[in-house]
Structures are given as structure tokens and as C-alpha cells.
Image: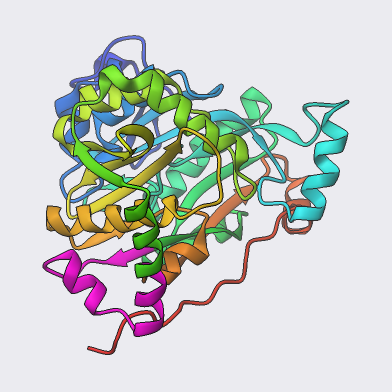
């Protein structure tokens, strides 16, 4: 691709990597702070706040894993912002969704070879949240055209840096029409762990419980009574930066016990910056038992949706606390007046019993090497499997 000088495009800083695709002028930045927030955020209205300049800044500054980020800003022929995408390198387990038997085998091997099947990948999307489609495109521009231009940029970057795999994530049903576009560029589309959503249509938590079928309501009531007996209570706060170290240590307890999915490793700085930089949009529900803090749920109020990001607890245990936590998250979503609650990956059975609907997610994978790429669709499914889940009829008919 021919290169342009950064000075040729209004609003860009000299020294940035700028490509002229013939359709778009594409500037690639190594740091979000090198981009004018007003320019970047001009494309955000109507999209998740997790695409915003301030969210990417807090993620970058939090020191998660070995992520190395690049931000691509697309401009049209008139120099106006047209689309944006972020991609990053990160070391990831190629068998991240391996079944239990294979995971046990891998754990044994990694005692001697810690990086066995751990690859540095080039990934496009958002590293700690789910966004479908994974890029932001101005409404008057064809997303498929942007994806084709982005593919050339990803392919060039992966080949220059020696990455073995390109991952574009995530594609939920709302972005299903983009999957054939990815396939025409040599990507194979594979299933990822599904997401959980609950449509919020109640005016109070009492209305929510009353709308449940008796079997599921009785199960929930039983667990709520157990927590009531244990004097479990909760409170919602929006300023938690001074609790960052404690909250992160609670999250680590849960993370180290996870047997379904592990990738990003949070830091106290992540909690600290999320509280400071997202303001009232970030929230923590604190859980107390006999006035002792025993856990928390980390939330993000993202437009008309509440995202349940993470859960942490003081001690690992198989008890009713998690069900109490999930119920309180639903109560918070109702109180905030959002229309949808994202409940995240894993612990599907509990979330489904509370009415959450499972939504499939797909990934688009491609090897930069034309020789290796045909093997991706063969070996990736052999190493990974996702649960076959079916939605439950938890709520009474309207």
C-alpha cells in the first residue's frame, strides 16, 4: 500500500503510520492517547462505551497480560472519521475452550513446557468485553468494505510481526451477515463460548420474581432465604478506586478456580481506573455477611445495557452466595431502568435458571500463511469445543 505523510490528513499527528487504501485513509496509532478524543469519540454515539477513548485509555493503562494495542482510524475521501477498530497482540492458549479431558492433559504437559500451545496472536475486537460487530462504522458506510480494508491491515501486520493466527471477535446474531464477508477473505468462522442476556421488562424485583414459573421461583427463594439466614446484604457504590487492591484480590480467588475459561488477568489498576475514568457508569455491588465484606460484582452501565463484567469473593466456595449475587445484579439493572442485562460467559446453568437467554458468539480465524490457513479449520475444532446449550422457559407466558 502506498504511504502518505501524516501531515496530509487533517487532525493527525506527524509520525503516525498512515495507509492510503484507495477507499480510506487509515492511520494506525500505538497509543489511544495519541488520538484526539473528540475525533475518536465522534463515531461512538449509538455504540458501546467500551469502544470509547476513555475506556480504551483505562484498559491500556491497566497493564493487563501482555496486550500490545494498535488503534486504526479510518477517514473518508474528505478526511472525515469513517470507522475505527482496535487490534492487539496477546499470548493466548490455542486450546482456550478445550474440553475437560484435554485440559487435564494440557495441564500435565505445561508443568514441564509452560508455553505448550500458547501462541502470540493478532486479535481484533475488545479484550475484556464483548462487542458485536467488533468495529465501529459510520452509518452511511458499508461495514463489509471496512472489514475488507481492515483485513489487509491485519494481514500485513501479522506477516510483518510473525503472528501465526489472526482472530476477529465477536460476531453475535446481529452481525451474522458479516460472517460470509470474513469467509470470502479466507477466515473460518468457529463458535466461541456463548453469552448470556436477560431482557429487563419489570418495574421492580418483586415483579421479576412474580413473573417466574413456580419451579424456578421456588429454587431462587430457597437460596435467597439461605443468604438471609446468614445475614448477607449488599450495597451499590460508584466510587471504589480506594478499594482496588482488595477487589482485585477477590477477583483473583474466582479466577484461579475457573475451569471453563481463563484469559485476561486483571490488575488493581484496572479497578482503580475503571472507577475514576468511567465515573458513575462504573459500579460495584459489595456483599457483606455479618458486616464482613465477602464479595463483589463489577458492573458497567453502558447506555441502555448493564454489563456484569466480573465477580470476586473473599474465599472460594460452593454455596448460595453466587445466586444471591446474580439476583442483586438483576435488581440493580431494574433499578437503573436499562432494557438489557449482559450476564457474561460461564456459569450458564445458574444464569439460565434466573431467566437469562443464551446467545451464540462466533469468531473469525485466519492464518497469515496461505500454506497454514487451510489447517486452521481442521485443528482448531479438534482442540476446542463449546457447550451445546438450550434456552429454558423460566418465565411465565406474557
Q: Is residue 341 left or right of residue 223?
A: left
Q: Is residue 387 visible?
A: yes
User: Considering only vertical position in the picture, is 309 above or below 90?
Assistant: below
Q: Residue at x 47, y 25 (%)?
A: 249
What percent of the width, then of the height, locates residue 63? 46, 18
Report if residue 168 lies within the magenta region: no
Q: Is residue 132 left or right of residue 386?
A: left
What percent of the width, then of the height, locates residue 147? 43, 49
What percent of the width, then of the height, locates residue 167? 57, 44
Between 182 and 392, the residue placed more toward the observer is 392
What percent of the width, then of the height, locates residue 144? 39, 56
Q: Quadrant of residue 296?
A: top left
Report if residue 201 lies within the magenta region: yes
Between 353 and 162, the residue placed more toward the observer is 353
Between 69 and 78, the residue placed more toward the observer is 69
Q: Which residues make up the magenta segment?
A: 197-220
Q: Is residue 143 visible?
A: no
Q: Quadrant of residue 219?
A: bottom left
Report how many numbered discs are placed on residues in the image: 0
Residue extending farthest bottom: 397
Instruction: Quadrant for the C terminus, please.
Output: bottom left
Q: Residue at x 43, y 43 (%)?
A: 149
Between 206 and 390, the residue placed more toward the observer is 206
Q: Identify the image's colour scheme: rainbow, by chain, secondary structure or one colour.
A: rainbow
Q: Residue at x 62, y 24 (%)?
A: 160
Q: Quadrant of residue 60?
A: top left
Residue extending farthest top: 15
User: Considering only vertical position in the picture, is 109 above or below 384?
Assistant: above
Amino acid at each position: 500500500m502506498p504511504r502518505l505523510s501524516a501531515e496530509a490528513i487533517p487532525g493527525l499527528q506527524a509520525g503516525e503510520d498512515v495507509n492510503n487504501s484507495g477507499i480510506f485513509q487509515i492511520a494506525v496509532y500505538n497509543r489511544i492517547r495519541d488520538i484526539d478524543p473528540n475525533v475518536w469519540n465522534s463515531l461512538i454515539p449509538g455504540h458501546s462505551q467500551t469502544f470509547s477513548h476513555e475506556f480504551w485509555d483505562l484498559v491500556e493503562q491497566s497493564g493487563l497480560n501482555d496486550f500490545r494495542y494498535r488503534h486504526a482510524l479510518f477517514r473518508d475521501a474528505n478526511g472525515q472519521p469513517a470507522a475505527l477498530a482496535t487490534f492487539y497482540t496477546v499470548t493466548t492458549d490455542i486450546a482456550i475452550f478445550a474440553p475437560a479431558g484435554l485440559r487435564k492433559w494440557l495441564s500435565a504437559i505445561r508443568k514441564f513446557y509452560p508455553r505448550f500451545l500458547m501462541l502470540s496472536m493478532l486479535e481484533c475486537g475488545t479484550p475484556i468485553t464483548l462487542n458485536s460487530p467488533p468495529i465501529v462504522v459510520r452509518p452511511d458506510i458499508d461495514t463489509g468494505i471496512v472489514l475488507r480494508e481492515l483485513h489487509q491491515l491485519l494481514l500485513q501486520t501479522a506477516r510483518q510481526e510473525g503472528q501465526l493466527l489472526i482472530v476477529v471477535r465477536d460476531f453475535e446474531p446481529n452481525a451474522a451477515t458479516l460472517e460470509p464477508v470474513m469467509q470470502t477473505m479466507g477466515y473460518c468462522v468457529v463458535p466461541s463460548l456463548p453469552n448470556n442476556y436477560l431482557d429487563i421488562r419489570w418495574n421492580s424485583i418483586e415483579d421479576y420474581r412474580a413473573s417466574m414459573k413456580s419451579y424456578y421461583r421456588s429454587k431462587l427463594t430457597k437460596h435467597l432465604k439461605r443468604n438471609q439466614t446468614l445475614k448477607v446484604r449488599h450495597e451499590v457504590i460508584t466510587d471504589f478506586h480506594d478499594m482496588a487492591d482488595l477487589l482485585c484480590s477477590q477477583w483473583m480467588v474466582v479466577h484461579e478456580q475457573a475451569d471453563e475459561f481463563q484469559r485476561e488477568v486483571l490488575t488493581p489498576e484496572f479497578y482503580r481506573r475503571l472507577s475514576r475514568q468511567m465515573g458513575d457508569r462504573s459500579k460495584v455491588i459489595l456483599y457483606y455477611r455479618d458486616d464482613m465484606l465477602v464479595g463483589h460484582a463489577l458492573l458497567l452501565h453502558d447506555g441502555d445495557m448493564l454489563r456484569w463484567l466480573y465477580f470476586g469473593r473473599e474465599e472460594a466456595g460452593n454455596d448460595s452466595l453466587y445466586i444471591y449475587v446474580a439476583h442483586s445484579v438483576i435488581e440493580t439493572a431494574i433499578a437503573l431502568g436499562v432494557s438489557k442485562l449482559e450476564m457474561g460467559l460461564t456459569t450458564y446453568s445458574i444464569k439460565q435458571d434466573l431467566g437469562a437467554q443464551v446467545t451464540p458468539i462466533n469468531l473469525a480465524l485466519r492464518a497469515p500463511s496461505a500454506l497454514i490457513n487451510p489447517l486452521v479449520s481442521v485443528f482448531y475444532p479438534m482442540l476446542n469445543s463449546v457447550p451445546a446449550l438450550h434456552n429454558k422457559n423460566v418465565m411465565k407466558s406474557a
